[in-house]
Image: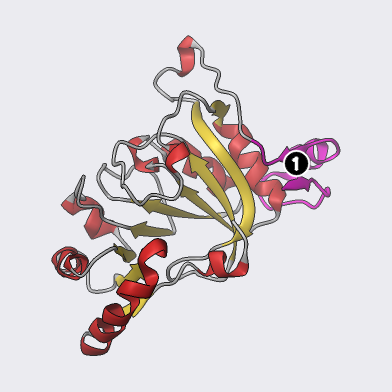
Amino acid sequence: MVFAASGRLVDGFGKFIAFCALSFTIVRLPLHFTMNKADKKYGTALPVMEQFYTIQGEGVHSGKAAYFIRLAGCPVGCHWCDVKESWKPKPHQLMPLKEIALRAALSGAPITVITGGEPAMYDLSALTGALKKAGLKVHLETSGAFAIRGKFDWICVSPKKRKPPLKASLRRANELKVVVYNRDDLAWAEKNAALVTRKCRLLLQPEWGKKETVLPYIIEFVQKHPLWQISLQSHKYMGVE
C-alpha cells in the first residue's frame, strides 16, 4: 500500500508540511532496524514495524478512517495473536518520532491509532505530543500491562491473562475490549470490568479463529448483561488491514 503526499496541508504543520509534501512518499513495507547510541532508550525514536492508512475494524470506533502506527516489541505473547511478527523489535527500523508524526499527518487521516505489539512498553509522551501538534486525534490500543505514558484522546485496553493489566491502566481506559477464546474469558471480562470507570465502554470480541464456536455464547451473555456490546473484526470481513 503506497500513499503519495498530495500537498494538502494539515493544521499545525504549516509551511514545513508544504515543503515536505512536494517529494515525500509513504511506502508500507517492512522497515530495516537501525539504532545508534543516542536512541538506545527510545528517547527520540521508536521501533516501527509498519504504518498505514486504513479503516479501524474493531471496537467503539469501528468503521472510521484511521492511520495505524504499529510499534514492534511485545512481551505479552498471546498464542492467538494475529501479528506475531511484531513481538521482536530488532528486525524493524528505529524511526525518528518527527518522521512518524509527519507520515501520519500527510496521510490525511483524522485519527492515529498507536498499536503493536505492546506500545505502552515505551514512553509515548513525545510521540503523542508530536501527533497532537499535527492536529491529530490519538488513540491507543494496549493490553494495559504497562504504565500508560502520553496524552490520548481514546484508550482501548484489551487485557490478557498471560500478563494482566495494571489497575491504573484500567482506570484510564475509555474502552475495555476483551477477546473471547473460550467461555472462561467471560469471567475474565467481568473481573476487569469491575476495575474500570463507569464511563468506560465494555466490549466482547470473538477470537477470529474461534468465532463460530464462541459467538453464540457471547450473544447470550450480552443479552443477559446489556452493558456489554459485541465487537467484530470488521476489517477482516471488508478485506482491509
- The image quadrant that residue 23 belongs to is top right
Residue closest to the eye, 225 or 137: 225
Instruction: Reply yes or no: does residue 52 show up in magenta.
Output: no
Instruction: Give the residue at x 74% y 44%.
Output: 14
Farthest residue toward the top?
Answer: 37
Q: At 79% from the left edge and 46% from the top edge, which residue is drawn?
A: 5
Quadrant (top left, top right, bottom left, bottom right) of the C terminus: bottom right
Residue 227, quarter of picture: bottom left
Q: In the rendered image, which residue does mark 1 sit on? A: 17
Q: Is residue 185 left or right of residue 203?
A: left
Left or right of 83 on screen, residue 14: right
Against 127, residue 231 (above or below) is: below
Choose between 220 and 120: the one closer to the eye.
Answer: 220
Q: Residue at x 53, y 34 (%)?
A: 48
Residue 55, compared with residue 37, is above or below; it is below
**What is the three-letter code of the residue carrying label 1?**
Ile
Label 1 neighbourhood size at 10 Å, few (<14), some (14-19), many (20+)?
A: many
Please give left or right for residue 166 compared with residue 149 in the image: left
Is residue 205 placed above or below 1 in the rendered structure?
below
Measured as percent of width and height from the top left, residue 13 is found at: 69, 44
Q: Position of residue 143 (x, y in %)?
A: 30, 50
Q: Position of residue 20 (x, y in %)?
A: 78, 36
* Residue in the image at 40% along x and 53% along y: 141
Residue 110 seen in the current view: no
Whether 15 is among the magenta residues is: yes
Query: Dot 1: what SS?
Result: helix
Which region is colored magenta?
1-29
- Residue nearer the viewer, 214 or 152: 214
Residue 53 visible in rendering: yes
